[in-house]
Amino acid sequence: MKNILIFLALSIAGLAYASGEMKEVCEPVKDKAGKVVKNADGSDKQTCKKIKVHKKVEGEKVPDGKK
């Protein structure tokens, strides 16, 4: 019984993970004055986040309603 519950939990977790493509978005770090912060080697310091990107579905145009 425990094996079945573990299998179901892992399969549901796998489906939730595969729902969107992961993309990493980076932007430069700025100080209070609005200037870009530099690393020790002289390159720009960046903060990166991983976000999910979903495919957009194209549909038909919605007709205007009568008022």
Image: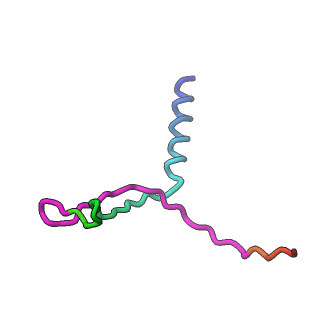
Q: Is residue 6 above or below residue 29?
A: above
Queried whether the magenta region covers residue 32, the answer comes back as no
Instruction: Locate the N terminus by quadrant.
Output: top right
Q: Which residues are magenta?
A: 38-61
Farthest residue to the top: give it.
1
Along the viewing direction, whichever of 49 and 29 lies nearer the viewer: 29
Along the viewing direction, whichever of 1 and 22 lies nearer the viewer: 22
Task: Answer left or right for 61 relative to 53.
Answer: right
Task: Answer left or right for 45 relative to 18.
Answer: left
Q: Is residue 29 above or below residue 10?
A: below
Identify the residue shown where x is 51% and y is 41%: 13
Farthest residue to the left: give it.
41
Task: Answer left or right for 30 relative to 50.
Answer: left
Q: Within the image, what quadrant is residue 62 found in?
A: bottom right
Residue 9 % position (x, y): 54, 35
- Report the coloring of the rendering: rainbow
Residue 6 % position (x, y): 52, 30
Q: Within the image, what quadrant is residue 39 found in?
A: bottom left
Identify the residue shown where x is 83% and y is 74%: 65
Residue 24 % position (x, y): 37, 60
* Secondary structure mainly formed by the magenta segment: loop
Along the viewing direction, whichever of 11 and 38 lies nearer the viewer: 38
Farthest residue to the right: give it.
67
